[in-house]
Amino acid sequence: MATSTSAATAPLTCHHLGLRLRPRLPSLPLRPLSPSPSLSLSRPTPLTPSPPRHRALHASASAAPAAPPSQPPKPVLQGAAIKPLVATIGTGVLIWLVPPPAGVARNAWQLLSIFLATIVGIITQPLPLGAVALLGLGAAVLTRTLTFAAAFSAFGDPIPWLIALAFFFARGFIKTGLGSRVAYAFVSAFGGSSLGLGYALVFAEALLAPAIPSVSARAGGIFLPLVKSLCEACGSRAGDGTERRLGSWLMLTCFQTSVISSAMFLTAMAANPLAANLTAGTIGQGIGWTLWAKAAIVPGLLSLVFVPLILYLIYPPEVKTSPDAPRLAKERLEKMGPMSKEEKIMAGTLFLTVGLWIFGGMLNVDAVSAAILGLSVLLISGVVTWKECLGEAVAWDTLTWFAALIAMAGYLNKYGLISWFSETVVKFVGGLGLSWQLSFGVLVLLYFYSHYFFASGAAHIGAMFTAFLSVSSALGTPPLIAAMVLSFLSNIMGGLTHYGIGSAPVFYGAGYVPLAQWWGYGFVISIVNIIIWLGAGGFWWKMLGLW
C-alpha cells in the first residue's frame, strides 16, 4: 500500500515523461520547485546509519580532549573582476579623451563614452548588471554629464516597472501550482517533442499579439510564467546546470519570435502607431491596420516557422523527443485534482490583467496600471507576499540596469548625438552614387544595427525613422516600401540585445541563456530575419502591387 501511495504522489519529471536525454555527467539533486510536495523535483537524500551506541561511547571515551573552538575564518571579499573592470573603464576613458567630431556637443560625446563603457561592462560583467549600470549613472552624475534627476529619470518610466511586475506575476503563477497545471496541459497537447512545444508557444503568442499592444506585457505577464513552468516541469532550471535540457532553447526561441509577432500587426507593439504617423507626415501616405497586416503576414509567418527551427539546429535542447509525455502528463493532471483556491485567484487575476491589456485603451487604463492592479489583488489575497517580491532579486536587478540604459540612451538623443549620426549617414550614403536598391540596403543595415545604441524601439523610431525614410525616398526607393520595411525592422531589430525591446529583459532575466550567447544568436537570427523580410517579403510586396 505504501508503494502505491508513493507512486501516486511522485512528481512528473522528464524521466517519467519518457524524454530521451543525451548522456551527461551526474548532476546534483535539484531543489524543490515550491513548498508543495506535488511540484517537488528534488530527490530524497539517503540517510547515513548512525554507529551502534556502544561503539559511540567507546569512541568518545578514547578520544582526545576537544580542542578549543577556532576563530571563524574571515569572510573573503567578493569585489569586481579586475580584467573586465579594466576593460570597462579603459573603454570609457579612451573615448572620453578623443576629441568629439565636428557638430557633436562635448556633453553628448562624454555621455557616449560612459554609455559605451557601461555596455562593455554589461557584456564582460565585472559586477552584476545592476551594479554596472549604477556605476555608469554614478559616473555620469560625478562628471556632471547628467544631473541626478536626468540620470535617474527612467526609473519613472513604465516599461522597466512593467518588466519587474512580470517577475512578481511569474512567482505567483509557479507558487500556486497554476503554472504546473497549464504546463502539463501544454505537454499533454503538444509534448511529443520539444519542437512541438516551441511552435505551440510561438503561435499562441502571435495570436495574442494584435490584441495586446505591449510586448512587455505579453512576454512577462503571460508567456514567461508559462515557459518557466514548462522548463521546470521537465527538470530544466536556471543556475543548476540543467538549463540546456529545454530552457535555454525555449527562452531564446520565445524571445526571438516575440519581436517577429510585434512586427506583424500595427497594434502588436506600442511604437508601431508612431511609425505609421511619421510615415503619413513624411510621404503623405499612411499605413492602416489592414495594409500593415497584409504586407507583414507572409514574411512574418516564414520567420515564425524558420527561426525556431534554425535555433533548434544551432542551439539544440538536450530534451528532443518525448513519445510518452502526452499520456503521462494527462495522468498527472488527473492526480492534481481540481484547482485550489489560490490557483483560482491567480487565474482570475491573470484574466483581469490581460483583459485590461486588451481593452485598456477604451477604458483609459495603461499596461503598467493594469499590472499594478493585478499585483495588488495577489498581495491582498496573500497569493504573493511582499517579502517574496523583495526576494525576486532578478526583478530588481533588471529594473535597475534597464532603467539606466533607457536614461542614457534617451539623453544621447536629447543632446543631439543621434540626429548628428543620422544626418552623417544619409549624407554619406547619398554621395555614393549607388542604385536605389543598393542605397536602400545600406541604409537599412545602418538603421537596423544602430539599435545597439537604443534601449527602446520607440526612441529609435523617434530619433531616426523620419531622416532615413526621407533620404530613402529621395534616392529613388518607393516611399511606401521604404516606410513599411523600416517599420517592420523597427521591431525585429529588438532581437539583437538583452535590452533592445520590452520582451528582452523579461526572457533574459530568467537566467537560462548566458549574455554572450544571447548577443551571438541574436546577431545570427537578425541576418535570417533580414533575408526573409527583404527577400521573401520583397517578392510578396511585388505581388501585392506595392512597388
Image (cartoon, rainbow, N blue to C red):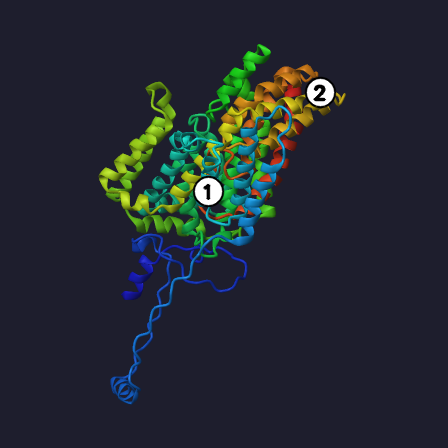
- The structure residue drawn at horizontal position 34% and vertical position 41%, both measured from the top left corner, is 168
Expressed as whole percent of the image width and height from the top left, the position of residue 245 reads 50, 53
447 or 414, nearer to the observer:
414
Expressed as whole percent of the image width and height from the top left, the position of residue 39 reads 34, 53
475 or 11, nearer to the observer:
475
Residue 383 versus residue 276 in the image, above or below: below
177 or 158, nearer to the observer:
158
Residue 338 seen in the current view: no
Crowding near the residue tagged with mark 1, few <14, some 14–19, many ≥20 C-alpha atoms within 10 Å: some
The amino acid type found where label 1 is placed reads Leu
Q: Which residue is mark 2?
A: 430
Q: Earlier in the sequence, mark 2 or mark 1?
A: 1
- The structure residue drawn at horizontal position 57% and vertical position 40%, both measured from the top left corner, is 522
> Element at badge 1?
helix
> Element at badge 2?
helix
The amino acid type found where label 2 is placed reads Gly
Residue 324 versus residue 303 in the image, above or below: below
Residue 34 seen in the current view: yes
Front: mark 2 or 1: 1
Q: Which residue is mark 1?
A: 135
Residue farthest to the top, as pictured: 284
Expressed as whole percent of the image width and height from the top left, the position of residue 263 reads 53, 27
Image quarter (top left, top right, bottom left or bottom right) of the C terminus = top right
Residue 424 versus residue 248 in the image, above or below: above
- Rounded to the nearest angstrom, the CA distance separating label 2 from label 1 is 40 Å
| Number of on-image labels | 2
516 or 431, nearer to the observer:
431
